[in-house]
Amino acid sequence: MATVLYHLGRVSFRWRWFVTFLWVAVLGAAGFAASKAPAAADEGFTMPGIESQKAFDLLEQRFPGSAADSASARIVFVAPSGEKVTATENRRVIEHLVDQAADGSQVADAVDPFQAKAVSADGRTAYATVRFKTGAADLADASKEHLERAIDGARDAGLSVEVGGDALASQPSAGGAAEVIGIAVAALVLLITFGSMAAAGLPLLTAILGVGLSMAGIMAVSEAFGLSESTGTLATMLGLACGIDYALFVVSRYREERAKGHTPREAAGLAAGTAGSAVVFAGLTVVIALAGLSVVGIPLLTKMGLAAAAAVLVAVLVCLTLVPAVLGFWPNAVLSRGARRNSRRYRGKQRKEDNGGSRWARIVVRHPLPVLLLGVVGLGAVATPVLDLQLGMPGDEAKPTSTTERRAYDALAEGFGPGFNGPLTIIVDAQGSADPKAAVATIAKDVRATEGVVSVSLARFNSAGDTAVFSAVPSTAPTDEKTKGLVSTIRDERPGIESKAGASFEVTGKTALDIDVAEKVQASLLPYLTVVVGLAIVMLLVVFRSLLVPVKAAFGFLLSVLAALGSVVLVFQQGHGADLLGVESTGPIMSMMPIFLVGIVFGLAMDYEVFLVSRVRESYVHGDAAKTAIVSGFKHSARVVVAAALIMMAVFSGFIGAGESMIKMIGFGLAIAVLFDAFVVRMAIVPAVLSLLGDKAWYLPRQLDRLLPDIDVEGEKLSRKVPAPTGPAAGPDDRPLAKPVPIR
């Protein structure tokens, strides 16, 4: 493989105009196709195989025209201190708002709180529900503005009016200024690492082009494959992250080969053949992790994973072709100022046997056991809170108090009880029952008698009269573990209730859906880990031709992910240090968080593993002793891996500045996972294990060695084929430096 990629790098460098034009043309074609392609309809969130989803499907079938996922707004009224909402003037204002809201063109109905008896016992709080004919994504701006004007009118009259539901919900945003700072830090890290504006800008430029192409492609095929707007979120994040990382490693290797005295074209070919080989297999491990998301069984997550996998493949192709092509335009610009001038200071640095990476590796090689124990025990201690992990989907209670959704949630909880914000929806299927109304009444009575249920609403029948729906209000909050127990109790008692009533029923609603999703994700986590880690071990077995190195890599990844998840639980569930991150309320961890952590961090972790250990393996194959190879490998790769990790941490940390708790959680989790994996696992545990194993680290049984393909990632065959550098040669494609760089 190294030889093939070597020739690809040389060809891309030589035919740089053609390669660049080809990529620009592909980008333009994809952009044109995206602009002409119709947008895919928002199919909403679905999860086949869970009871809540079955109940939603039944509701849409038996109650046509009132989709289960249609938008709604719950308008909460709180009277001024010393007054009641039932006072004549306040009642008039509320009724006027309801009448005005009902006139909206997309409104299905608006329920008057006084007719629906939606007034708290103390008379200070009431709520009106406005239901729409479409989902929140399809609501017209005019419909939203119409409702907002009605609400503003009630506020002007002196009432406190807050709005819950999804119709007017504020959309989560990224970190804003904090995210800009994160990107600026990433650019600064690149500049410090390379000492050249061109070298710092090249990875950013090619990564942005790759992401642009990926997103245009996703938009172009969105209708054909049912890809919603949110599908490309993960593709953008990982396409940018991997694109920067991959270009970073190739440019770094190019500079290294130039310092050895190779001509620009030869250096580009060698960089593509060596670092490019590592890029290919690092990219494939990321693709495995993302494609493996289909194991979870969530259609949206499967589409997000496949779209992101496509973005990573584009990043790999861009890195192997466009990066050498751009290097061909400015072969000396990516070198540091000292290298371009061939200054005395630069020559001194080239003659030095040590740098920060090699010095650190020597410390670890001298004391491998203490470093290993400290790293494993430390990460294990941080991972301990995972034992208390509670999965769920934080709702309005997790939003900042500055949002109207959070204030509406608090007002309803105070006026009607904590469980009022998460009612359970009971759907009764009475087809075949002799007396559907009696059957529904029996089920409602037994549900009302269940401990933990405060009240049930009147049942609403469909036009055929064979299906009914009613709500049951728990005594505890939606995210409370007692509410989860209540849902399980009702479902466990169902056989007896159904036998008595002569009809069947399902339990759904947002609270039940969140519980079902959390349980399914939790059940899918182990199979997902097994598939992803198993396939990655096989691939790393081929790359490193070793039994123990892939197992060590997988073990280190599991350590870093568990430690990151433990940190998330510590902050966002248990509340330790939550104030420092601006988290106003704690609760269950987002159901998708473990899956996101595993998928994204696995990809980045394997990047660092492949780039670090492939350089160690390269030195070992070329004749260095096992421990010497560790020092040599870290000398050439540690600085770049650290830079890549700092860039990812800076980008991910930008999400911590977001107002939404869930976005904070994702940003914090990813940033700290990269911290643990890059600096504790890859920089400490990996060299310590390799040092303790010595030559055994590279042991591979002869029979297995014969079966595995020889892909030559470390470039052993390439080093025999490429002649030793004799100094820069003149020519149109091999422009020399001002003075030859000393050959070492």
Image (cartoon, rainbow, N blue to C red):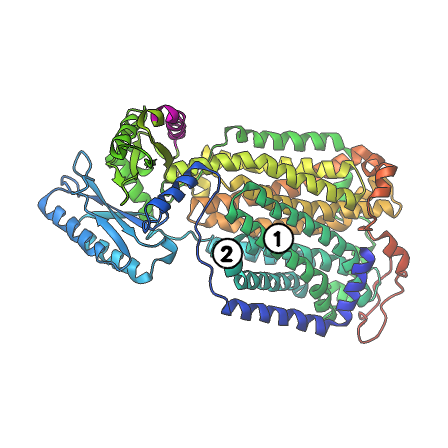
Query: Circle 1 sits in a helix, a strand or a loop, which is it?
Result: helix
Residue type beneath disc 1:
Ala
User: Are the two marked residues, 1 and 2, in contact with CB atoms closer than 8 angstroms?
Assistant: no
Tell me: 692 left or right of 500. right
Amino acid on which disc 2 is placed: Gly
- Quick check: 189 above or below 11? above
The reply to whether residue 430 is in sight is yes
Q: Is residue 483 magenta?
A: yes
Looking at the image, tell me whether mark 1 or mark 2 is earlier in sequence order.
2
Q: Residue at x 59, y 64 (%)?
A: 213
Q: Main secondary structure of the magenta part?
A: helix
Determine the secondary structure under disc 2. loop
Neighbor class of circle 2 (other Cα within 10 Å; few <14, some 14-19, many 20+) is: some
Name the quadrant containing residue 401.
top left
Q: Which residue is mark 1?
A: 309
- For the residues labelled 1 and 2, the Cα–Cα distance comes to 17 Å
Locate residue 130 relative to residue 655 in the image: left or right. left
Residue found farthest to the left: 88
Q: Nearer the viewer, mark 1 or mark 2?
A: 2
Q: Which residue occupies 31% across, 48% down?
A: 404
Q: Which residues are magenta?
A: 480-497
246 magenta-colored: no
> Could you say which disc has been placed on residue 226 in the image?
2
